[in-house]
Amino acid sequence: MGNGKSFFEGITYKFAEYYCKTFQGGKNLQTKDKIAAAIKAAVATAMNDGALKFSDALPEVALEVPPKKEFGDFATNFAMQSAKIFRTLPRKIAEEIKVRIDSNMFERIEIAGAGFMNFYLRSDVIYRELKNIYDAGENFGNLPNKNNVTIQIEYVSANPTGLLHVGHGRGAAAGSAIVNILRAAGYNVESEYYINDAGNQMDNLTKSVNARYLELLGQEVDFPEDGYKGVDIIDTTKRIIARDGDKYLNLPEAERMKILGELAYEDKLRELQKDLKKFRVKFDFWFSERTLHPKKIEETINILRYGGKIYEKGGALWIYSTRYGDDKDRVVVRANGEPTYLAADIAYHKNKFDRGFGELINLWGADHHGYVARVKAAMKMLGYDADKLKIIFLQMVSLFRSGEAVKMSKRAGTAIPLRELMEEVGTDAARYFFLMRSTESQLDFDLDLAKSQSADNPVYYIQYAHARICSIFRQTKEAGLILDGEPKFSLMTSTSEIDLMNKIFEYPDEIEKAATEYAPQRIARYVYDLASTFSSFYRDCRILGVEEDLAKARLALVKITQHTIQHALNLLGVSAPERM
């Protein structure tokens, strides 16, 4: 690759990345396709002229963004790939293409090394695309639909027996952000909450609320040993009494337990949904585990049994999971005839595949690592492609206040509920802090920093940049400066202006990478960097008091920046305030 430098190399380099990652299909494939088409046309002309001869199919024209901007905006090794076919030196092939290529997009084309072709785009191509971004408005960042299979993302799925805690909060923030990012990247996505509303945990909820019900109504009662002792159980029971009084007190115990269990379940689910709504998390579908019992589980077990995937030992039924990558075989039906949690999970994942999802993504706590092999083994036994099941693990969250670890709720003396965190630091800060680190990394959540109104607080810094932009528009409106007509972007050539353009051109690439890597932290980092780049622009580039066309061009760039910040924050589930 060569060493020439373009006057506009700084801006065109990021623009090239922008095009490579943004336009991957259909009529929107513009610059990259045009370069490839121009190369193909030049090759055809060279062959017609007799300058190049071949006797086999030609390779595809592969274009890349060079690792360093001085090597051009796009580069191709087509000449080297086709050397054997043409039986000609790569550099000679590159030269024949260069003299015949017909395109007005390039400032110049250089041949380097053994035959690399480096393409330097003209600046007007860049400014034209900046105008396209400006015209896209709030839709900038939404990539073309990939027309792919539907991806199902299941996350949170906490038992409806208590309040969501901060660990669930990290999963809720990550899951909802991944859903948003994948949709922006053009994927078809459906989100789901799996309600664990069957099994021992529901029995324990029923026993716990029954005991509190009797206790709060003045009855002597021994609290069940395996009951839930949290304050939230008392709160649930109080809400039942406030609504229904003692109407269940004198019912036969079995009948009272059945009624109270269902009322408690409904109350817990409402509280859970209320917290999720406040945390800006919305699910497309809520799946009840109860719908699997007993029929769907029995059907699944029978399929495995008739397929020779199950054996009996000690009165229990086991699956041959070691034959499919697990470290040991697993029980699916206990000796007492009760299905295990694994049996329900197998039936649930079978149901997911049967619903036609092309890919399944689950967000699980890090303590579920050992569960992956057994679920995937069962999917293989049932004939599904286990590679289409992706597990994202969520590492632990540690809260710190004044440098000291905070482990317990002030009120309940248990794990800190998500609602307490939202009350203390706000939903915006809670979501951003959960998302600014990879889910694979343990997270130290600094409560003091999350509450601070300073540039040290990243979410405050980003939101302040957006509020500053809104203030700019209020000031320019008062001064009579209004965006009308087509901005003359070519007037902007300063370093701060080009840096801000470069950062904006990066955004679609960041969305694509965040989607393929399931990495919302990329968007969190990007929007922080964008706010920082904008701050430099704001410091260096006046809008009022300069020539009108330049002022309007800068104001249009500010509008693009505003839309990009809004879009990125929306993906993260964080608000973009107009005043602070």
Image (spheres, grey):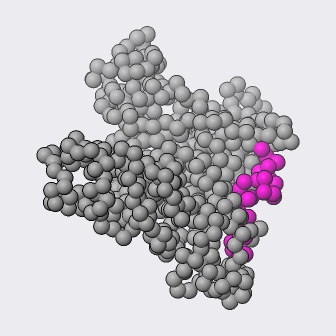
From the viewer's perspective, tell me whether residue 282 is left or right of residue 49. right
How far from the left and from the top, in percent, is residue 46? 20, 58
Q: Main secondary structure of the magenta part?
A: helix
Left/right of residue 566 with respect to residue 476 in the rendered view: left
Residue at image coords 78%, 35%: 407
Is residue 339 or residue 540 the one in the foreground?
Answer: 540
Residue depicted at 76% across the width and 53% down the height: 457
Give the residue at the far bottom of this rendering: 480
- Who is closer to the viewer here, 67 or 460? 67
Position of residue 556 in the picture relative to residue 410 (left or right): left
Query: Hey, which residue is sitting farthest right in the picture?
Result: 402
Q: Quadrant of the C terminus?
A: bottom right
The answer to whether one can see residue 299 in this image is no
Rendering quarter of residue 223 = top right
Q: Position of residue 355 (x, y in %)?
A: 35, 45
Residue numbers of the magenta segment: 446-472
- Residue at 33 percent across and 50 percent down: it is 62
* Residue 2 visible at all: yes
